[in-house]
């Protein structure tokens, strides 16, 4: 909670973490050890870019940890929570007076810093694909879809996770391979070699990580309560309407539409305002300390300062724009104009829309992109008599593939502020991840997602599109 609060305050104020401080050596290290470390790094700088297995496995663990964290938390919050923890993994920079003329000991050290930053940024974005709450674009799509097609009961927290988790896992694995090869080279034998003796640098890093962990101290009462509420919220989301068995929402069948994912979020949110975090005490004239009140886990003042009102207004404006397109007949008119696309193969239509969305989201915000695209693609699917989910699901997933530029995504902007990366580095690395993402989404929409939603059949909950001409 402490780290999350600090990260949110920094993001709210527009202040990003500075470049990590030099990594200290182990205090008990001798002069011979320091000399050995320098000689070792000078030798490595003249060798091919092949990385040792232990460090590669650490990066894969970081990717998995940050991806899992962004499943239920918003990807930006997850990134703000974990980015300070990358500091112990950074390579040892030299002072400005170093004879090597750079602030990094070796070229491989510089590449390591780039790789570590991009690993965290990309994994938090990839993890946000797996749940409706993982990113704002998923929330906008779910609200738009449920509003436009109220008779469809196929899209919920569980079904979204079922089809998106395999895609995110494949994208994560292929992205790790791509980034590892791009920055450090990829030697299969060295990468997965186990039992190798640690060098002095690795021992120093392990010591720093241990010290940072000890500084955290024991888990506090407030953190325990927050963890319990988080687990309860996740369980309620998954069990509301799992699909294969009746969920707890069936208990409120007399009130359809009232037991939703928003109901769970509001209930857990209210508990944060009610559960006491600490007692407020005062000293009586007799010197006795008595408790007179308590402070909740979140106060209204804290909520106002942390609440991203700009995002709320942006999302609300998107819903208003979608309703305006529907009521004015603009959506129907666009659908009629795009109906000639029905002569193309459906996979080509999906590929074109996915590439269009992926390109647009690099220069525009993700919520704005999905808000503009959804009112166009929905009438298109209805006009060519295709299941709307067949086109909307891949387009929604591709909206999150903003990996190229620092301005494309909040995590990209934060890692760019560290100073290790140049724009060209992000463009080259992000282009490969974009290609991987679109390819995996196309694979999923043509294989395992099809039977889940019966995508080859035009559903009864979708309206029949008539070829009317607007006046």
Image: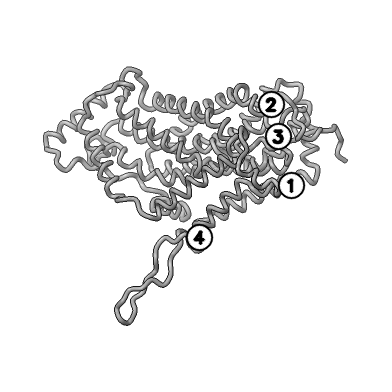
Are the residues tagged 2 and 1 within 8 Å (C-beta)?
no
Residue in view at x 21 percent, y 26 percent: 197
Disc 3 residue crowd, few under 14, some 14–19, many 20+, Cα 10 Å: many
Q: CA distance from mark 1 to mark 4?
A: 34 Å
- Disc 2, SS: loop
Q: CA distance from mark 1 to mark 3?
A: 15 Å
Few, some or many residues within 10 Å of mark 4 (<14, 14–19, 20+): some
| Mark 1 surroundings within 10 Å by alpha-carbon count, few (fewer than 14), some (14 through 19), many (20 or more) | some
Q: Earlier in the sequence, mark 3 or mark 4?
A: 4
Q: CA distance from mark 3 to mark 4?
A: 41 Å
Q: Which residue is mark 2?
A: 455
Q: Which mark is residue 273?
A: 4
Say which mark, if any, is on residue 323: 1
Residue named by callout 3? 377
Which residue is at the front of the view, 125 or 41? Answer: 125
Residue 98 in percent (x, y) is at: 22, 39
Position of residue 370 relative to residue 273, above or below, is above
Name which residue lies at 38% across and 55% down.
221
């Amino acid at each position: 909670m402490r780290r999350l609060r600090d990260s949110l305050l920094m993001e709210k104020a527009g202040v990003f973490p500075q470049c990590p401080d030099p990594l200290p050596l182990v205090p008990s290290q001798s002069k011979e050890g320091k000399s050995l470390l320098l000689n070792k790094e000078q030798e490595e700088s003249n060798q091919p870019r092949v990385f040792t297995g232990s460090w590669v496995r650490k990066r894969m663990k970081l990717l998995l940890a940050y991806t899992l964290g962004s499943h239920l938390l918003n990807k930006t919050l997850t990134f703000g929570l974990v980015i300070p923890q990358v500091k112990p993994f950074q390579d040892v920079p030299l002072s400005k007076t170093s004879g090597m003329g750079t602030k990094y000991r070796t070229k491989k050290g510089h590449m390591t810093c780039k790789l570590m930053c991009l690993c965290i940024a990309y994994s938090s974005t990839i993890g946000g694909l797996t749940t409706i709450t993982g990113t704002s674009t998923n929330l906008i799509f779910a609200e738009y879809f449920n509003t436009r097609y109220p008779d469809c009961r196929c899209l919920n927290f569980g079904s979204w996770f079922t089809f998106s988790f395999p895609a995110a896992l494949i994208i994560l694995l292929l992205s790790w391979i791509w980034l590892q090869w791009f920055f450090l080279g990829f030697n299969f034998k060295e990468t997965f070699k186990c039992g190798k003796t640690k060098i002095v640098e690795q021992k120093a890093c392990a010591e720093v990580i241990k010290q940072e962990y000890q500084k955290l101290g024991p888990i506090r009462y407030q953190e325990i309560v927050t963890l319990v509420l988080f687990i309860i919220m996740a369980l309620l989301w998954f069990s509301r309407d799992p699909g294969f068995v009746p969920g707890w929402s069936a208990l409120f069948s007399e009130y359809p539409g009232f037991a939703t994912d928003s109901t769970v979020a509001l209930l857990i949110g209210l508990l944060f305002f009610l559960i006491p975090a600490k007692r407020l005490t005062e000293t009586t004239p007799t010197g006795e300390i008595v408790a007179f009140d308590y402070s909740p886990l979140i106060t209204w003042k804290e909520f106002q300062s942390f609440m991203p009102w700009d995002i709320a207004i942006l999302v609300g404006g998107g819903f208003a724009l979608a309703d305006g397109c529907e009521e004015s007949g603009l959506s129907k008119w666009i659908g009629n104009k795009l109906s000639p696309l029905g002569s193309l193969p459906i996979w080509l239509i999906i590929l074109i829309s996915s590439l269009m969305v992926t390109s647009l989201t690099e220069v525009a915000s993700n919520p704005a992109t999905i808000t503009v695209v959804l009112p166009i693609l929905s009438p298109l699917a209805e006009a060519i008599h295709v299941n709307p989910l067949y086109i909307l699901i891949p387009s929604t997933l591709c909206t999150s593939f903003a990996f190229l530029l620092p301005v494309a995504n909040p995590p990209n902007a934060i890692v760019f502020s560290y100073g290790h990366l140049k724009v060209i580095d992000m463009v080259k690395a992000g282009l490969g991840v974009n290609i991987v993402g679109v390819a995996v989404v196309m694979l999923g929409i043509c294989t395992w997602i099809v039977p889940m939603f019966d995508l080859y059949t035009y559903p009864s909950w979708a309206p029949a599109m008539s070829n009317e001409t607007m006046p």
